Image (spheres, rainbow, N blue to C red):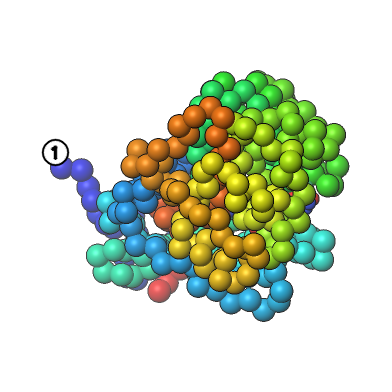
Amino acid sequence: MTLPTNRERVASRLRIGSELLYLSRRDVEHLHLTRDAILELTRQALVEHGHRRYEMPAKIGVHPYDNVFYHAMPAYLPGPGIVGMKWIECYPDNPRTFDLPQTTGLLVLNDVDSGVPLAVMDSAWLTAMRTPAVTVLAAAALHPDATTFAMFGCGVQGIEHVRYAALAMPKLETIHVYDTDEAAADALIAKLRPDLDLRIVKGESPEAIVKSAQVLSSATVILRRPLAVVKDEWVTAGQTILPCDLNTFWDPRTAHRADKYLVDSIEEHELFASMGYFPDGLPEVVAETGEVLAGVKPGREHADEIIVNSNIGMAVCDIAVGHAIMHHALEHGVGTRLPL
Ligand SMILES: NC(=O)c1ccc[n+]([C@@H]2O[C@H](COP(=O)([O-])OP(=O)(O)OC[C@H]3O[C@@H](n4cnc5c(N)ncnc54)[C@H](O)[C@@H]3O)[C@@H](O)[C@H]2O)c1
């Protein structure tokens, strides 16, 4: 028996070419795609990327204000036959100014065979999910025996990073968290402690945390000029650092002197550098995250290597997760059908 193609699966539930499926944030969240499923979808997308089986031009964007960007993130994955684009914005002051998230957006998925749009969905939830999935998949590959993890920034991303770290890093015993807004760190701990079978500790200071954790990640704000909160002299041999806020949080000297500097996409990082986000220059990149996960390039080769792995977010991961959300929604009759 041959399995139905992607198109046949969609066509059995949607009049392709006449209507599209709209999924609100509530629809997407209530589908309850599991974090395990998202880890696997993200891993597969990274492996496809590592083997160069993708088309994904670096994000083009517009920039109405300083430190604000809108990005168009198109991608095509020929293996599973997925094509789509995420359209997102990043307004670092939104939480303070409007009580709105820093990042919102929409994802559009198309039918690869005919090109017509199949679905439009809110992309906040999938961004909140696939970003930590990338961080912890990389962390597990680069530092498999880590018992300590630290998270700087306890907002949307910070909370999910802690959840995903607990899921994907099998030896983890303690997670340190830090936020300039102490209430955010307290809220993260209150929310997650009952669910997670490991210690979650509020760090006294960035320095104390850096001196306590083997693997560290940050999701704070993305700014052109580095805040350099973590001083280079605090970072010691063997640590793995995985920023998802580009070069903002860390002393730029660390990435430059690291034994290995890896990024999810060289093209994306070069683009950000051309926009002034790496005023000290983009460090030399030895590999992309997907290449390590695909086994194409080595990750950690010595216990005492300092490794920095910056993941700024890739559309291949978005469309892979979004595609699964669309199928799930069609199968469960969730969402609103809109005429094309
Ligand atoms: N790499 C990616 O793929 C990706 C995806 C989504 C978001 N992001 C980035 O991640 C960052 C966080 O996003 P979010 O949705 O969690 O935002 P959020 O506003 O929900 O949370 C950010 C948290 O960081 C804290 N913070 C700000 N400056 C800090 C500092 N100097 N030290 C410690 N804590 C600090 C804030 O108090 C807040 O609690 C943003 O920069 C966003 O652009 C990256």
Question: Closest to the observer: 84 or 208?
Answer: 208
Residue drawn at 67 percent across, 53 percent down:
252
Position above or below: 230 against 117: above
Find residue 288 and report its horizontal and vertical position in percent.
44, 49
Under mark 1, the amino acid is: Met
Q: Position of residue 195 (x, y in %)?
A: 67, 26
Quadrant (top left/top right/bottom left/bottom right) for the N terminus: top left
Query: What secondary structure is marked by label 1?
Result: loop
Which residue in the structure is indicated by mark 1? 1
Name the residue at 77% across, 64% down.
Answer: 93
Whether residue 174 is visible here, answered yes or no, is yes
Residue 14: x and y in percent read 34, 59
- Nearer to the camera, 8 or 160: 160
Q: In the rendered image, which quarter is residue 338 located in? A: bottom left
Report crowding for label 1: few under 14, some 14 to 19, many 20 or more residues within 10 A (C-alpha).
few
Q: Residue at (74%, 38%) from the top-left corner?
A: 234
| Residue at x 52% of width, y 61% of height | 269
Total marks shown come to: 1
Tell me if residue 195 comes above or below residue 2 in the rendering: above
Q: Is residue 333 left or right of residue 88?
A: left
> Residue 84 at x, y = what percent?
40, 63
Work out which quarter of the rendered image holds the C terminus and state it.
Answer: bottom left
The answer to which of 129 and 201 lies nearer the viewer is 201
Q: Nearer the viewer, residue 76 or 171?
A: 171
Q: Residue furthest left?
A: 1
Residue 29 in view in this figure? no
- Position of residue 267 in the picture relative to residue 186 (left or right): left
